[in-house]
């Protein structure tokens, strides 16, 4: 039930982010979700796209360092305490959230949030047993 | 002021005769006592007794820093350990330092030459010498210290660092002389200004500055910002430490090398051929009075030339022009010798790091700064920021613990470091003169 995310090493230099997204555009890759984590020297661009392998190839050819990571897409009820409830479940299960970011689109009356956990399988088990819906990779790529 | 009138103003002919006598004695000693020299002289097919003139010195092979490393730690010592009273060391490219040992007489000779050097810089009894060269394995601190005591001046053994305290002591103790690197002298001036103090109003009158390359324009800046005379001093631990050569305050133009203790040659660094007076090349030094580790034709890698015209100060010892650079890729960062290969060996120990790196040396707030740029490969890359920051922190820490220099590590994209044919351009030195 995990989703593949690609992450890209981006130097903090003018035009680098544009170069990465242009490469994806040329390869006709559609971005579903993204986050940019940054430090003073570099950033890490994390992407969920419709065609992961095509995206990785396009970026690698452009000279970027690219990595693939398993993440989990969780349906979060679009109401107050929606996210808090889910984080509480994870906390109870002693699962560490490395980072998270939200989807560009909503899924019905839910928001979708991408989580990076230290242990994806355990996290998925904890969430599903608490009736939190975790989206399949197919569902995410085709959103 | 001339400290040792007899030797410092010795007529050139008498000086040459003294040099030859001392050279011959040194060659006999090293041939008898140091297997390295016996082998290298034998290989060159020359015996010490065949050296009958100073020109004959050219027939002897050079000694390189690598020879010191190959004979680490004590292989080049010409006396038994019972006669060694002090050990110092400088950094080496493999992480192993270059060890030098001094006999009691060596320390006395060194103190004498430092006292001469201080005197040449206009320092005398009654002066308060604020010694901010590092004490420890580095020769600067203790070398200057013993010389200051020999001279009879009052020395404050500050060592490096702790800048605020340096400024307080300097002001309260009425320091009249500062000994440190040129860059640190400027840093002191700025730090004083930040404290709301004007260092120009302190009692300082002379700075004896060395251990890193500097230029005439930096001298002017120092003299203006600290309201002192800035004097260039030269030395290297392989030969002695500070006090091998110094500018006189009268001329402030070229460094008198103490020729009754050292024979200096200038060679073409490519061919090894000895150049004519006045031509620029690599400085080669032979020690002719040192007991612990005599050095025969040591290649310093420093580029300079002789100024043979007599000096207004009256000293007969020739002058070397301010060092203009290095014949190898050694960097001097905050007084510490650093070879790019040392950084490389540290990087190679970090798993996943490829040999694509670049060193950017700059001067910020008058202090040298080093940035190590490392290309991020897929093996190194993680989608988690803390892992990436941990990586740069680990590299920074490794460099600090091995080379004792603080640097900034910058992770860069693959291929962003310019590739060149043949010898890689590893170093970008942005320090301006």
Image (spheres, coloured by chain):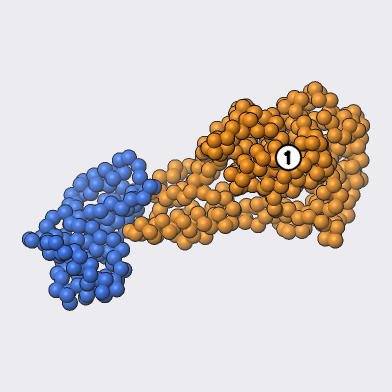
Chain colours: A blue, B orange
- What's the residue at 57%, 37% (across, down)? B192
Quadrant of res B423? top right
- Residue B416 in percent (x, y) is at 40, 45
Measured as percent of width and height from the top left, residue B274 is found at 76, 34
Q: Residue furthest left?
A: A108
Residue plotted at (65% across, 52% down) = B92
Residue B156, above or below B68: above
* Residue lying farthest to the front in this orientation: B172
In front here: B184 or B62?
A: B184
**Vertical position of residue B261 compared to residue B254: above or below:** below
Quadrant housing residue B315: top right
Q: Position of residue B266 (x, y in %)?
A: 74, 34
- Quadrant of the image containing the N terminus of chain B: top right
Q: Nearer the viewer, residue B346 or A23?
A: B346
Q: State the residue at coordinates (18%, 49%).
A: A28
Quadrant for the C terminus of chain B in the image: top right
In this rendering, the answer to whether B234 lies above or below A108 is: above
Q: Nearer the viewer, residue B363 or B52?
A: B363
| Side of B57 where B327 appears, left or right | left
The picture places residue A89, in percent across and down from the top left corner, at 22, 72
Among all residues in the image, which is located at the extreme bottom?
A129
Chain letter of disc 1 in the image: B
The answer to whether any part of residue B55 appears in the image is: no
Which residue is more in the foreground, A129 or B340? A129
Q: How many marks?
A: 1
Badge 1 is on which residue? Answer: B129
Residue at disc 1, secondary structure: strand
Measuring 87% from the left and 29% from the top, which residue is drawn there? B9
């Amino acid at each position: 039930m995990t989703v593949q995310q690609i992450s890209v090493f981006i130097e903090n230099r003018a035009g680098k982010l544009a170069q990465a997204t242009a490469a994806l555009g040329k390869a006709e890759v559609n971005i579903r979700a993204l986050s940019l984590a940054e430090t003073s020297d570099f950033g890490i661009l994390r992407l969920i796209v419709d065609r992961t392998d095509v995206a990785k190839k396009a970026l690698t050819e452009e000279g970027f360092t690219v990595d693939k990571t398993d993440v989990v897409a969780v349906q979060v009820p679009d109401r107050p305490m929606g996210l808090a409830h889910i984080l509480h479940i994870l906390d109870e299960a002693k699962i560490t959230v490395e980072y998270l970011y939200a989807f560009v689109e909503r899924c019905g009356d839910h928001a979708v949030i991408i989580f990076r956990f230290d242990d994806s399988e355990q996290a998925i088990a904890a969430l599903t047993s608490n009736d939190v819906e975790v989206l399949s990779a197919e569902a995410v790529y085709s959103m | 002021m001339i400290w040792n009138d007899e030797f410092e103003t010795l007529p050139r002919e008498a000086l040459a005769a003294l040099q030859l006598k001392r050279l011959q004695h040194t060659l006999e000693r090293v041939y008898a006592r140091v297997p390295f020299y016996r082998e290298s002289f034998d290989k060159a097919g020359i015996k010490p007794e065949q050296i009958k003139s100073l020109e004959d010195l050219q027939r002897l092979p050079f000694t390189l820093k690598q020879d010191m490393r190959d004979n680490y730690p004590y292989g080049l010592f010409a006396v038994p350990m019972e006669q060694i009273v002090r050990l110092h060391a400088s950094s080496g490219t493999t992480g192993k330092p270059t060890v030098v040992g001094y006999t009691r007489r060596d320390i006395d000779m060194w103190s004498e030459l430092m006292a001469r050097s201080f005197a040449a810089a206009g320092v005398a009894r009654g002066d308060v010498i604020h010694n901010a060269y590092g004490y420890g394995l580095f020769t600067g601190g203790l070398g200057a210290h013993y010389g200051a005591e020999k001279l009879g001046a009052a020395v404050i053994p500050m060592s490096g660092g702790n800048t605020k305290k340096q400024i307080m002591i300097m002001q309260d103790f009425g320091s009249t002389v500062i000994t440190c690197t040129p860059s640190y002298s400027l840093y002191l001036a700025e730090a004083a200004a930040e404290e709301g103090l004007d260092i120009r109003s302190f009692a300082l009158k002379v700075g004896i500055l060395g251990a890193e390359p500097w230029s005439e324009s930096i001298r002017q800046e120092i003299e203006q910002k600290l309201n002192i005379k800035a004097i260039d001093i030269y030395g290297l631990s392989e030969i002695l430490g500070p006090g091998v050569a110094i500018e006189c305050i009268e001329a402030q133009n070229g460094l008198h090398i103490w020729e009754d203790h050292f024979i200096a040659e200038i060679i073409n660094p490519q061919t090894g051929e000895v150049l004519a007076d006045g031509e620029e090349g690599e400085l080669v030094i032979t020690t002719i009075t040192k007991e612990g580790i005599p050095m025969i034709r040591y290649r310093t890698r420093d580029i300079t030339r002789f100024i043979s015209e007599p000096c207004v100060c009256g000293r007969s010892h020739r002058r070397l022009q301010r060092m203009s650079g290095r014949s190898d890729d050694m960097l001097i960062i905050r007084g510490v010798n650093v070879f790019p290969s040392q950084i490389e060996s540290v990087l190679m120990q970090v798993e996943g790091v490829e040999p694509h790196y670049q060193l950017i040396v700059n001067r910020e707030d008058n202090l040298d700064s080093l940035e190590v740029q490392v290309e991020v490969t897929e093996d190194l890359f993680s989608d988690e920021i803390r892992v990436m920051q941990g990586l740069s922190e680990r590299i920074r820490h490794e460099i600090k613990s091995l080379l004792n220099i603080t640097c900034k590590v910058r992770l860069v994209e693959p291929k962003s470091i310019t590739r060149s044919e043949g010898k890689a351009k590893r170093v970008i030195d942005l320090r301006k003169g």
